[in-house]
Amino acid sequence: MVKKLKNLKVPAFDAQNFLDSAGVLRKIKEFKRAEAVYAQGDAAESVLYLQSGGVKLTVVNEVGKEAVVAILGPGDFFGEGCMAGQSIRMGTATAVSPTTLLVIEKSEMFRVLHTWTKTPLPVT
């Protein structure tokens, strides 16, 4: 028999707090409107966290037609394909406004996630 847990409060995940508290080694990069963050075919070596601004993700097919895949805003992660074994970027990321990103190298993200998953969640 499974009991339903009523009034269970699960705190929302705060990515910025996680990055700050986990001691993630990262660098901050700023981009101007219409500046490329990375291009389709570039080496996929980092995960990016959008602190402010906006980013458009696009892909170009084999006949040259471009499609917008996503528009991202503050609090979004992208470029996570490198964590799943992608060695190159599958699309292009372009700033749509002045943008600030945290760039986290793939090996650092693996280290932090591995450490974090071994940390017990707080009981509230």
Image: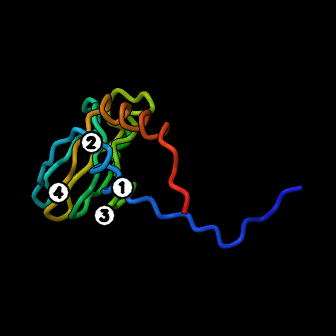
Residue, disc 1? 15
- Name the residue tied to disc 2: 23
Rendering coords of residue 57 (x, y %): 32, 52
Q: Residues within 10 Å of mark 1 (few under 14, many from 20)?
A: few
Q: In the drawing, does residue 94 fall left or right of residue 60?
A: left
Amino acid carrying mark 4 in the image: Thr
Amino acid type for the residue under numbered disc 3: Gly
Label located before the other in sequence (1 or 2): 1
- Which circle, 4 or 2, is nearer the viewer? 2
Tag 2: amino acid = Gly
Say whether disc 2 or disc 3 marks the residue closer to the N-terminus.
Answer: 2
Residue type beneath disc 1 = Ala
CA distance for labels 4 and 2: 19 Å
Pair 2/3: label in front: 2
Q: Nearer the viewer, residue 52 or 43?
A: 52
Query: In whole angstroms, how far apart are the C-alphas of marks 2 and 3?
Result: 23 Å
Q: How dense is the environment of label 2, judged by Cα within 10 Å: few (below 14), some, or many (20 and up)?
A: few
Between circles 1 and 3, the one closer to the viewer is 1
Q: Position of residue 47 (x, y in %)?
A: 31, 41
Residue assigned mark 3: 73
Residue 92, percent across and down?
28, 45
SS label for mark 2: loop
* Residue at x 38% of width, y 41% of height: 80
